[in-house]
Amino acid sequence: MARGLRLIHAAGPVLISALLICPSIVRGQGTPAPTLEAVLAAGGTYVSEFTKTFSAVVSEETYAQRLIGAIAPGGGERRVLKSDVLLMQVRGAGWVTFRDVFEVDGRSVRDRSDRLVSLILKPPADAGEQVRLIAEDGARFNLGPISRTINTPLVGLMFLHPEAQPRSRFRLVRMTRVDGQPAAEVEFAEQATPRMIATHDNAPANGKVLLDPLTGKVFRTELSLTSAGSTVKVLVTYKAQERVGVLVPARMEEEYELGGMPDIGTGNRIEGFATYANFRMFNVDTATIIKK
C-alpha cells in the first residue's frame, strides 16, 4: 500500500537551542562569528525575499530516479522526468513548490501549454486547488511504493522562513566556507505539530542549512525524515543565476531507504538526482517574460 508524504504549513512555539559561539573568522581579521539569533534573522529575511522573487520564476527540471532492491529485480528500474517547477503561495498551506511533468522517459505526457505561467499571470479563484491537482498528477510518475510530493528542491529551505522558524529548534554548529565564501552551518530539528511534512506517524523532520551569516543567502540545505521505518534524505545545492536576484536551486540529490514494509522486504531504495535550468522570470505587473 502506498505511503504518503505531504508538505503542509503550521505555526508553533519558538524553540532555539543554546548559542554555540565559534572562534572562526567571518569577515576580516579578528571579527568574531555572529550569534545564532543573528544568523537566523539574516536567513529568515533572505528566505522571505526569496519566496517573493522566486514565486515569479518557472524553471525546467530534469529529474532522474532509480529504484533499487528486490522490489525492482533485474538490476533496478529507472525513469527520467522533465517538468516545469514553480513556487507558489497557496491559501491554507503557505508556500508550496510543485512540478508540472510534461515528459517521461523521452515521451510527452501532455501538451506543454505553460499552465504554470497562467497561474502566475492570471491566477484563478481556485488556484490553490489547481496547484494541488497538478502536484498530485505529477506525483503519479514517481518510482516506488511511496506516494510523495515532498521531493521538490525548496522543501528544506522553507524551514528557515520567518513564519516557520518558530516550529524548530536551531543550533549553530560551526563556521565554514562554501566556494570560498563564509558560511554558517545551522542544524534544525522540528518540534511543533502538526508537522510541515505530513506522515502517517507524525514524524518530525530535521536537517541542516549552510548560509551566509551576514546576508542570509542559502548555499545548501539538507533535509531528513524517518517515518514508519523508512528514511528520506534530500540535499539541495544553490548557485547564482543571472537576472533572478537570488541563489537558485542548481541540483537536488535524494535517497529513500524503504523499511517497515513487510510485503516488499528490506534493502530497497529510491535514488533521485535533479538539475535545474531555463529559469523564466515573470514580471506579473507587466506580464513580461524574462528568460535566461
Image: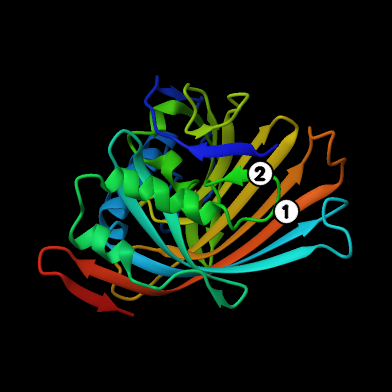
Nearer to us in this view, 292 or 199 = 199
Mark 1 touching mark 2, by CB under 8 A?
A: yes
Mark 1 → mark 2, Cα distance in angstroms = 10 Å
Q: Nearer the viewer, mark 1 or mark 2?
A: 2
Q: Mark 1 points at which residue?
A: 270
Q: Quadrant of the C terminus?
A: bottom left
Q: Is residue 220 visible?
A: no
Q: What element carries label 2?
A: strand
Q: Is mark 1 on a helix, strand or loop?
A: strand
Percent position of residue 224, x then y:
62, 41
**Residue 109 left/right relative to 267:** left
Instruction: Decide: few, some or many residues near mark 2? Use Cα within 10 Å; few <14, some 14-19, many ≥20.
Output: some
Q: Which amino acid does label 1 sit on?
A: Ile
Percent position of residue 129, x then y:
33, 43
Residue at the (25%, 53%) spot, across then down:
52
Q: Quadrant of the N terminus?
A: top right
- Please, is residue 152 above or below residue 35 in the view? below
Residue at the (45%, 51%) spot, across then down:
135
Percent position of residue 181, x then y:
48, 63
Q: Name the residue under label 2.
A: 146
Disc number placed over residue 152 in the picture, else none: none
